[in-house]
Amino acid sequence: GRKVYALSLGENSELTLAPSATSPIRATLPIDDTDFKETIGAAYDAWTTQMVAKARARHEHQIAQRDRIARLEASGDISALEGAGDRPVQEEDGKVPLMLESMFNGDVTEISPEIIEEWGPIVQEEIDGEPYWTATVSYSAMTLFGKIQSEAQALMRHGKVRKWIYTGSGEVVP
């Protein structure tokens, strides 16, 4: 019934626990003899609710950006779109060599070419007031809860991937 800190998960699904994060006192229990899964599950559910709200807001922002870009292109005033440099190359199978290079250089560790299930189109967006070429990748990420479907977006400008973000939350992908 006491609150403890889970420090690690060892072989045979045993948790190493301590009364505080820095305590030298340790105990080991099977994970099923604790409420760890329920506690993490509840925290994950709360996080998911928050991420869904962020994803909805981001999706609405992306729609507004695409509408704005379409209006600019239709009017012939593309000067606001020129700050991202040349459009990156996208191969017939959807792969974007610039994004692959970024993965191979270690700019992102959660995503590798072999786990990508789908490549999205390259589009131009304004994010945080800056123009970027963006493209998404869909993949399965391994988590404590098993594999989950994920989607990330590369923000590209002037021939470089500037950063990778999760499309739902906008957080940086490790």
Image: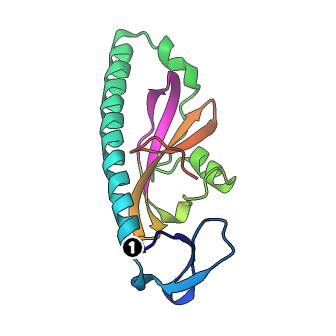
Pick the front one: 60 or 133: 60
Q: Is residue 111 above or below residue 15?
A: above
- Residue 27 lies in quadrant: bottom right
Q: Position of residue 159 (x, y in %)?
A: 63, 34
Residue 28: quarter of image: bottom right
Taking the spot 41% from the left edge, 46% from the top edge, the residue there is: 120
Left or right of 28: which side holds 33? left
Q: Residue at x 36, y 35 (%)?
A: 58
Residue 9 in which image quadrant: bottom right
Please say if 40 is above or below 138: below
Could you tell me residue 101's position as x and y percent?
64, 50
Q: Tell me the amino acid under the disc marked 1.
A: Lys
Residue pointed to by mark 1: 37
Regarding mark 1 in the picture, which secondary structure is present there?
helix
Q: Which residues are magenta?
A: 120-138
Is residue 80 highlighted in magenta?
no
Please state which of residues 27 and 116 is positioned toward the viewer in this rendering: 27
User: Relative to 17, does residue 14 appear above or below in the rendering?
Assistant: below
Give neighbour class at mark 1: few <14, some 14-19, many 20+ (Cα, 10 Å).
few
Q: Is residue 50 left or right of residue 166?
A: left
Q: How is the image coloured?
A: rainbow
